[in-house]
Image: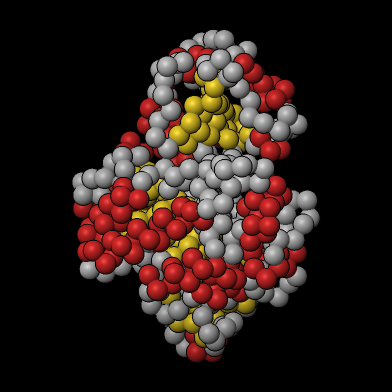
Amino acid sequence: MKTLYENGKILTMESPWPAEALVEEEGKIRFVGQRQEALALLSSKDKRKDLCGHTLMPGFVDGHSHLTGCASALSMVQLAGCQNNREIVERIKEFIGKNKVPAGKWVCATGYDHTLLAEKRHPTRELLDVFSQNPVVITHQSGHMGVVNSLGLQEMGIGPDTPDPEGGKIGRDESGNPNGYLEENAFTQISQVIPPPPEKERMEAIHQAEEEYLRQGFTTIQDGLIVEKDWEILRRMDQDGKLRADVVCYHSLKDIPFLSDENPAYDRRYGNHLKMGGYKVFLDGSPQGKTAWLSQPYVGEAEYRGYPTHTDQQVFSFMKKALEDNRQILVHCNGDAAAEQMIQCYRQALEKTGCPGVRPVMIHAQTVRRDQLRKMAPLSMMASFFVAHVFHWGDVHLQNLGERGKQISPLASAMQAGVCFTLHQDSPVLPPNMWESIWCAATRITRSGQKLEPRERIPVYDALKAATINGACQYFEEGEKGSLRPGKRADMIVVDWNPLEHSIDDLQRVQVLETIKDGKTVYQKGK
């Protein structure tokens, strides 16, 4: 059966556009063009869908996020918006009481931002030691650092004599005792001691998280750092037909390098809606947390520039393996020193192996420089920009980076250099709201109203490309997704008005009315 979409704007993200009508058949787009030609393709058994003046466009393709991380956040204390330490404690107390959390069980909270707290610093274990019956962890909004109480430190086996791990830091008081603050590799170790929830509960949380992506218009979602236990749950959900969007997973090349090898049916190809896209590595940390690795010191620091997670030789070996395995690699780089390490090591690995490129993706690319973008283009190296940093942390970057802070997320320079790029929200760091990212790309306005380097703004149409056709290119799926063209999958959204015909300031008010995956409605507003 065919379905005709008519009586609205059809934004194809290809030229010419807009079109008058689109015909879908068996999950694929059969026709895009004039309404009279579309009508000639229909029979009496086919359906006609009245868009009622609304706009049909491609579904969003997620440049980078963490689906299972969003699922985990649903069961945590939400600390976003806390203005001081007292509010943090109050929210945790309320959660423990409401959920009748038994003594001895871990209590996990997420979303505090020390730059927005009245104290202007990270909390310490003393604050959380009021919870004397439970190990407690609070995760920074960036996900790169956090704080645990004394019981939590004990559970992790961290004491006065515990050394800092490579690529991480254990905060200490004046006497050298751990103060509860952990960053980077010191913090990520906490996942090894917190018991996972029951499988049924985990599946329901993933379902709820996926629902939020669908509500926001995403038809392809990323899990940018899948762990083995969550992969097994996703695989079972996929086999049971419980995934509605396409989900592309990347696993740590450092910790579980054989997960792709053990799942050949999902290796760079979909089962139903799930596939393993390749590898993920971290080269540094967070610029707002001052753990991103820079080529020049942070403002107010004599020498401190953040620090690398791996040596050059280790990064070269990661790139070499990705090339030899012909698997894409996502590389977390916030600082320009980390960006340079990625570029140089990938180039050396290309020369050493002689292998074809794998479209490596520089994830976040907050402080990548123009000269580095010019090096990336000949390597077919992509960037996925966390451009919403401009609004949420732009003011902090100006404090930490000075003039360099104005240049964060240099989208226009990437376009000029010929670097294909995508946009992302790094959910659960921020909700999966692509419209906010598009607005940030077009305006570059900070939370306080400052305008960061207007020359790095890009037109709304180019931001939409980054969220659709460029996203498909990032996954090697440009022939299947990202634009509305005959032969492509019918991954589409209906929005209340054409984002190219209204003021840029209206972008954040666009409403997704319907999300369509492979021709089937998977979300409808109000239903």
- Comparing 114 with 50, the one in front is 114
In percent of width and height, residue 497 lies at 68, 69
- Residue located 48% across and 18% down the image: 153
In percent of width and height, residue 195 lies at 40, 24
Q: Is residue 297 above or below residue 421?
A: above
Q: Is residue 488 above or below residue 174?
A: below
- Residue located 71% across and 61% down the image: 452
Q: Is residue 235 above or below residue 129?
A: below
Specify the quadrant that holds the N terminus. Answer: bottom left
Q: Is residue 403 left or right of residue 217?
A: right
Q: Is residue 286 left or right of residue 400?
A: left
- Comparing 207 with 61, the one in front is 61
- Residue located 25% across and 49% down the image: 260
Residue 512 seen in this snapshot: no
Residue 193 seen in this snapshot: yes
Instruction: Give the colour scheme shown.
Output: secondary structure
Q: Is residue 210 left or right of residue 90?
A: left
Residue lying farthest front? Answer: 302
In percent of width and height, residue 247 lies at 40, 53
- Residue located 55% across and 30% down the image: 146
- Comparing 458 with 489, the one in front is 458
Count of numbered badges drawn on the protein:
0
Residue lying farthest right? Answer: 449
- Comparing 156 with 513, the one in front is 156
